[in-house]
Amino acid sequence: MKIVVVNPNTTASMTRAIGETAARVAAAGTDIVAVNPADGPASIEGFYDEAFAVPGLLREIARFERDAPADAYVVACFDDTGLEAARCLARAPVVGIGEAAFHMASLLAARFSVITTLGRSVVALEHNLSKYGLSSRCARVRAAEVPVLSLEQPGSPARARIDAEIARALSEDRAEAIVLGCAGMTSLAASLSTTHGVPVLDGVAAAVKLAEGLAALGLRTSKACSYAPPLAKTFDGVFAGDAPR
Amino acid sequence: MKIVVVNPNTTASMTRAIGETAARVAAAGTDIVAVNPADGPASIEGFYDEAFAVPGLLREIARFERDAPADAYVVACFDDTGLEAARCLARAPVVGIGEAAFHMASLLAARFSVITTLGRSVVALEHNLSKYGLSSRCARVRAAEVPVLSLEQPGSPARARIDAEIARALSEDRAEAIVLGCAGMTSLAASLSTTHGVPVLDGVAAAVKLAEGLAALGLRTSKACSYAPPLAKTFDGVFAGDAPR
Amino acid sequence: MKIVVVNPNTTASMTRAIGETAARVAAAGTDIVAVNPADGPASIEGFYDEAFAVPGLLREIARFERDAPADAYVVACFDDTGLEAARCLARAPVVGIGEAAFHMASLLAARFSVITTLGRSVVALEHNLSKYGLSSRCARVRAAEVPVLSLEQPGSPARARIDAEIARALSEDRAEAIVLGCAGMTSLAASLSTTHGVPVLDGVAAAVKLAEGLAALGLRTSKACSYAPPLAKTFDGVFAGDAPR
Amino acid sequence: MKIVVVNPNTTASMTRAIGETAARVAAAGTDIVAVNPADGPASIEGFYDEAFAVPGLLREIARFERDAPADAYVVACFDDTGLEAARCLARAPVVGIGEAAFHMASLLAARFSVITTLGRSVVALEHNLSKYGLSSRCARVRAAEVPVLSLEQPGSPARARIDAEIARALSEDRAEAIVLGCAGMTSLAASLSTTHGVPVLDGVAAAVKLAEGLAALGLRTSKACSYAPPLAKTFDGVFAGDAPR
Amino acid sequence: MKIVVVNPNTTASMTRAIGETAARVAAAGTDIVAVNPADGPASIEGFYDEAFAVPGLLREIARFERDAPADAYVVACFDDTGLEAARCLARAPVVGIGEAAFHMASLLAARFSVITTLGRSVVALEHNLSKYGLSSRCARVRAAEVPVLSLEQPGSPARARIDAEIARALSEDRAEAIVLGCAGMTSLAASLSTTHGVPVLDGVAAAVKLAEGLAALGLRTSKACSYAPPLAKTFDGVFAGDAPR
Amino acid sequence: MKIVVVNPNTTASMTRAIGETAARVAAAGTDIVAVNPADGPASIEGFYDEAFAVPGLLREIARFERDAPADAYVVACFDDTGLEAARCLARAPVVGIGEAAFHMASLLAARFSVITTLGRSVVALEHNLSKYGLSSRCARVRAAEVPVLSLEQPGSPARARIDAEIARALSEDRAEAIVLGCAGMTSLAASLSTTHGVPVLDGVAAAVKLAEGLAALGLRTSKACSYAPPLAKTFDGVFAGDAPR
């Protein structure tokens, strides 16, 4: 089974880290291919960055669909950037790391809180939770106010700030599990779970397992209506009228 | 990895069918153990049957927890009978087949409909969808008005009725995927998907893959609050004060 | 008129206290019969205890339905344990003390808060509020962190902790009424109302009046669909196929 | 116990019918006093009529509060016209016949439909259901398109139209109980219940029993915030600055 | 274009201030006519005052509709007192200042908080937000605990209290815009926006622009159902059977 | 006042029609500048087209912000494509034609239905309604199944199909107003309103009046959190680190 994990930002070191996490949790027999677009924002922090990341994300997926289709795709930005558009493009399942973590957390705890990077991303995540139907399962989306790229820097105060927000989530929100709201936090999950004594979910790992599960069952994205293949259009896009049906 | 699948009713033929589906979809290296309680209702159709099925379900899980803990448990009744109580009892993840199908369908389609057996079960499933947060993803819960045990009988009109309800769900509810709302329908999913051209989800298969995924990631049921181990009580129950913590 | 009040736990002293409250508030001409199952948990604190309390509860109601039907039944656990299953069994109205208090509080105040015993019960009560439709009327479910059985012990800090939570509910939640979230708090309502200057509702009293009202109007549980009588099943249950229709 | 039932419209024959229903269902020892304002609309059909009915309603309640306070008040228009304002005025409980029927139906059935008179009243009732929190319990508010005052006319097609709407509610809405959405339908409830085989609730009867119950328990309207007594104002109103506190 | 702004309370100095704000923001070519009823409460603080203000409001609108119809009407009380009834009466659009501010704030910020005068008005505003559908856009309705009429008094602590509540809304509610919840605060909006660095919306100004916009587009209140003209009634009301259709 | 109306697709004839509608409804003194991106999809039908339209839309807004800032911007695609990202970029208000029509319809009718082009767009519009908070005001989003570009073709069956859907919306959904769900329907609104006797709203016209109103009041997009200016990023985007703050 081949799972293509697309980091929609262009920071290759983050793509590598995401790919390593994905490969570490993948089942025997699952090939993880982690890629990122050549062009686009170096990180995705808020609505504006999302907008410019989506075309690159879709071009990556289109490239695989045309040349070497995957059994499932993972969109590896916690905002689930471009997820619905990717579903129009792919026949295989497409799983966002945000939704993956939300769904898995719902199986382990009555309510969870999310710890994301910056306050400007909170409303986008709340929109997603509402769209997925899971708002009532999320006690609160919290921002640790650490920029995405600082998560990779040695000596950053990121870990301390994330610890502090988790502690507040457990006491103030009565959260019973924690979802880490950024692909850049992927390496922290196990350690944070040990520290705080509750499940701490990383979206990359969650998405890989959901993608494997869907693909193993032969399930594919519904093409019935919302995610029908794009209509042929004369524009400077990926498929320009010959999108795969 | 060992996954214990508990059919909470006492119909052994249904347990066998469930176990076969589970084994068929399980990954290499996953052992499926399918069991049912010795005592309790032969099928679960509505609130009353649920109530009498739960103690037997819990005794099965308790037996494994004490003697041979599983890596994950699946509750194989679409009503997700006794799911929260089971989570109090187990340290490993516990996945209901109803919630499993709802969550997986949410990853493949913008909206799904559920086809269950009898009208009397509809409200219980609607309660569950609301509890899980997924009501907005479900267009409608429909009843095919086929009793659970008739699903196993040759010559039953069950298949025709289920086909008719799926057709209505696609045209009237604008459903883009179908969830089969009974463990007894587990063998029909692939054929129905072919017939109707949309993803058709069986909860048993979905739950096995979610359970495998959670267990592979080392995730466990949160013991922070709602699913904390039972308090010691002097009563004629399973653990009578020595429930595992 | 005969109202059967079933305490689903097995603590006879609590059954007596519940019966006394019920009898005190009952109208002239109402006979209160307070009973509890012989077997089951001594108190109900969380999902696990609930599961083991329900069969005993149903057996008590079944006994009355067969031998000496009541005009209405009250389920005297604040979690409204087994309420829907009991409605399948009885032709007469069945009222849970939790829902009774929620509905009555809604007639007296724009918003109320609930003070229950332990944090592990909070989510179950939130589920109930959602199921009844009354989540928007409840500002918050709070736990005083006093075990149920300690409420009966002289010198327990229970009263002080409940006072403190009520004070917080009035100032922080802007609650305008208080619902006491445990049958064991039944004797405190009047005194707490005097102390805090807002309506404080006890579910036992509320349920008795609602049960009297429904029964006096000749209203009965709908048998149209969700609460239809149990189907005949060959299992080791109460009615084993001859449940009253 | 004295319960004052205020019909907010000025049709004395309707007040008499309401008073008779109320007296018929009242407990021994309950005095029903049914009144209507001298001035205002002859019936309440939609938002505009409501507006002109409220001052008269409040003047009636104010008159009793000043001269001969009731133990509880019933607002006998299904729109629950002026209910919150009446709660500001009265120390005793105030129950609207709409909310009373909604709350009681919720105790008997998983979902109910409402049959009201004219389509123009549907949205007002939906607003009320949302305000009370009970929208999710109501499958649909239906209009039989019979004017309020025609309900009293011999030979009117009202009964046939109501029957037809109830039949549709049971088959199309999957309603399990029916709420009659007009005080003028009060005499039809028992007969309709017999015809259709499900509980059919009349708000007048429901409100009297809820009012009796609240008053018997010594419960009173919360004065904590939303229903605090009116502030002294220099205007041509009822109390002109000396409203009872 | 003529816009009639009705202050539903009888305080002429407030009507003048409202009229001045309305005229100041009106487009060239818009005539603002600001009026108030002769009789009714001097200010509207809570449900009770609202009830007595509505008939006077409707009589003012009816007078214009009969003698000199406006192109649009503005109801200039933040509770949107009598708004639906006014829509039944008028063919032109009717805009409440509360709803106007809520809708406009929704176009500028992901979430807003409301600062109103007294705590007793909070629930009425929450009801309105729910009715309009905008509850999810409002982080919190806060009361500065300043009486309406004190807003006009020199040396009142009103400004300081409003400043303090805005500061809390920004830090505690994560509000991104502020809605001033009283027509009496109309002159403070610009200054508060400068102080706090976020959009601060005054309902009077917002309603004038929405009313101008609707009228300029030739849009009128729908008469299809809920806001159909009042039915002819024999009562001491405005139109006594000859309401304009 | 200058209002820049950006059609996010590249069909110049549609941009001209949108610009003409905008100019026709604009106030004296309002300059309408209608533009479209050079590159991108020729029409926006579903999630995939949206994704490729957004960068072009943002580049247009960025160009104006840098060279000749507008007093307000209108995003002239009914999906409100890229609306939040545009708000991050602009200091002036940004109004989507979808949200504009929804908000204005809410001021004229208790409930409205939307008639859009293709079924694949329905879920995206439902997501928007939920995000804006206005789901409860919308009875149903209906698709006339007419492709966007066919709306401009003489002899197309589009008008007949739209008429048929409006008729269904009025009878089946009890809609009291209609929102036209595509910028290409802008010229049909007045005629459809005459035919069907209810308000029919065109988003382009609605957005221009809302944009004029917001700008006239000096209101600007909140920069407090969600719509804060983009962070400096090293990527091949519009501002590459020098986005205006």
Image (cartoon, coloured by chain):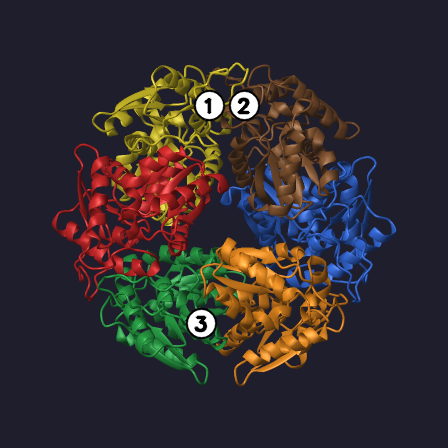
Chain colours: A brown, B blue, C orange, D green, E red, F yellow
Task: Tell me the crowding category of disc 1: few under 14, some 14 to 19, or many 20 or more residues within 10 angstroms, Cα based.
Answer: many
**Mark 3 crowd level (few <14, some 14–19, many ≥20, 10 Å Cα):** many
CB within 8 Å, label 2 to label 1: yes
D100 to D67, vertically: above or below: above
Q: Amino acid at mark 3?
A: Ala
Q: Are marks 2 and 3 on the same chain?
A: no
Quarter that holds the C terminus of chain D: bottom left
Residue D18 occupies which quadrant of the picture?
A: bottom left
In the image as oriented, which residue stretches furthest toward the front?
E155
Residue sitting nearer the eye, C165 or A245: C165
* Res. D81 visible in picture: no
- Name the residue that disc number 2 marks: A54
Q: Marks 2 and 1, Cα distance to the nearest angstrom?
A: 9 Å
Residue pointed to by mark 3: D206
Check disc 1 and report the residue beneath it.
Answer: F54
Q: Give the vertical position of F121 relative to E172 (above or below).
A: above
Which of the image's four quarters has the N terminus of chain D? bottom left
For numbered disc 1, what is the local secondary structure? Answer: helix
Residue A185 in picture, x, y percent from top left? 66, 29
Label 3 residue SS: helix
Q: Position of residue E66 (x, y in %)?
A: 14, 52
Co-location on one chain, circles 2 and 1 = no
Q: Label 3 marks which chain's residue?
A: D
Residue visible at 16% across and 50% down? E65
What kind of element bears circle 2? helix
Pick whichever, F6 or F41, lies toward us.
F6
Q: Give the chain letter at badge 1.
A: F
Residue B152 shows in the view: yes
> Is F90 displayed left or right of A183 in the figure?
left
Kindly identify the residue that appears in the image at 83 percent across and 51 percent down.
B65
